[in-house]
Image (spheres, helix red, strand yellow):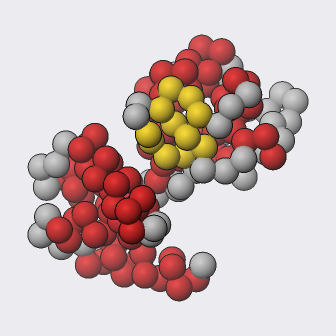
Amino acid sequence: MSIEVTVAAPFRQHGTDRLGEGEFVVALSLDREWFSPDQAKRLIDIAAGRGLVERADGDLVAAFEPGSVEVPEGFTPDESILQSQSLFERLLGTLVADGAEKQDAVAEVNRLQRELGVTIETAAVLAARRRGIDVGGLADEVRRSLAEA
């Protein structure tokens, strides 16, 4: 999957499974010239939404083993990976549209995920419901995705 390869590359480059968000952006935009800085930031949101990375104290922590992902010689990601909006992103968008600050909403969702041991999408549904936001259709999608897992 090219998104996993793309996300793994900066971690492999630095030989770690934890990077500052800035380091991650620089690795993808300046070092590899794959994306603009804004696109690299968007990739972070997509990767977090798909559970590939977690945010912790301003850092990105790989939720997989980057060393186990092979980055082929000459690999260049397709920009289409930036266009897909994950279920998590749609839930996050609902929280933000209701007035939550994006960073605060992500922190709340991450906290719920950690404390309850649930998927990030489930935590986002819980965060929305706690704020009185109707996410019925998205909650149904989360239920279906859990049933298929």
Outermost front residue = 115
Q: Is residue 94 left or right of residue 131?
A: right
Q: Quick check: 33 above or below 43?
A: above
* Residue 129 position in % (x across, y down): 20, 71
Q: Is residue 131 above or below residue 13?
A: below
The structure residue drawn at horizontal position 51% and vertical position 36%, both measured from the top left corner, is 60
Closer-to-camera residue (35/109): 109
Left or right of 91 in this view: 30: right
- Quadrant in which the C terminus appears: bottom right
The structure residue drawn at horizontal position 44% and vertical position 41%, both measured from the top left corner, is: 55
Write the residue at 30% across / 69% down: 125
Q: Residue at x 28, y 53 (%)?
A: 108
Q: Hey, which residue is sitting farthest right in the picture? A: 73
Q: Count how many numbered circles sit on residues in the image.
A: 0
How far across and how far down the image is residue 101, in percent? 19, 42
User: Percent position (x, y) of residue 136?
Assistant: 26, 78
Q: Can the viewer see residue 18?
A: yes
